[in-house]
Amino acid sequence: MKVKILIGVLLFLIAVNLATIGSYVYLRFSHDHTRFPFNRERLDRRIRERDHRPDLHLNQEQRKQLFSLFQSYRSETDSQRQQIGNLEAQTFELLQKDPVPMDSVKQNLRKIADIRYGISLHIIQKLMEAKSFLNPDQQHAFYNAIMRARMNRPTPPPPHDAQQPQQPQQPPVPNP
């Protein structure tokens, strides 16, 4: 009788373990990642940014004005940022050719620099607008936040359709 109870308990524990492992595998690998993407690095970065975000002590009206300022900046510079992305992709493709057409690469780099200069002028215009409704302490904190965000900006990855560069092969080392 004791052996039958032990076998029953053992089978029960095996079933519980299989159910736990099955649930984990199902939740880990079968849900739709395109609808519910989970990126641990992005979550960690957002938590770090939240902890280091300066408090500008804005009132409700200032928040609305700053929010509309950011929205207008994004909408007004979106096409320029897309142009930069396209030019960077073209430059990457040009660098893959053999020999590299340096005149075309230099021309693309000049275009990118000109567009970024235009975006920088646009940023200055928006900072001057923000100056009209922020006090000097808020302006200083706002400027520091912008500079910190620019320094922490990740570099864009190469285009998805580009081939990965091959690693150069090391020559064999002769045995002494």
Image: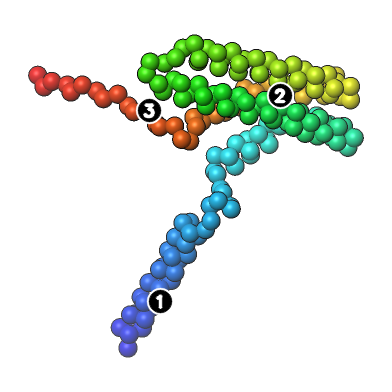
Mark 2 burial class by Cα count in 10 Å: few <14, some 14-19, many 20+: few
Residue 26 appears in the figure:
yes
Dot 2 falls on a residue whose secondary structure is: helix
Mark 1 burial class by Cα count in 10 Å: few <14, some 14-19, many 20+: few
Mark 1 residue type: Phe
Spatial distance from mark 3 to mark 1, Cα to Cα? Answer: 53 Å
The numbered mark at residue 146 is: 2
- Residue 50: x and y in percent read 68, 36
Spatial distance from mark 2 to mark 1, Cα to Cα? Answer: 59 Å
The numbered mark at residue 12 is: 1
Residue 54 appears in the figure:
no
Depth check: give the residue in front, 124 or 59.
Answer: 124
Dot 3 falls on a residue whose secondary structure is: loop
Contact (Cβ within 8 Å) of mark 2 with mark 1: no
* The quadrant where residue 148 appears: top right
Residue plotted at (57% across, 27% down): 86
- Which label sits in the foreground, 3 or 2? 3
Mark 2 residue type: Ile
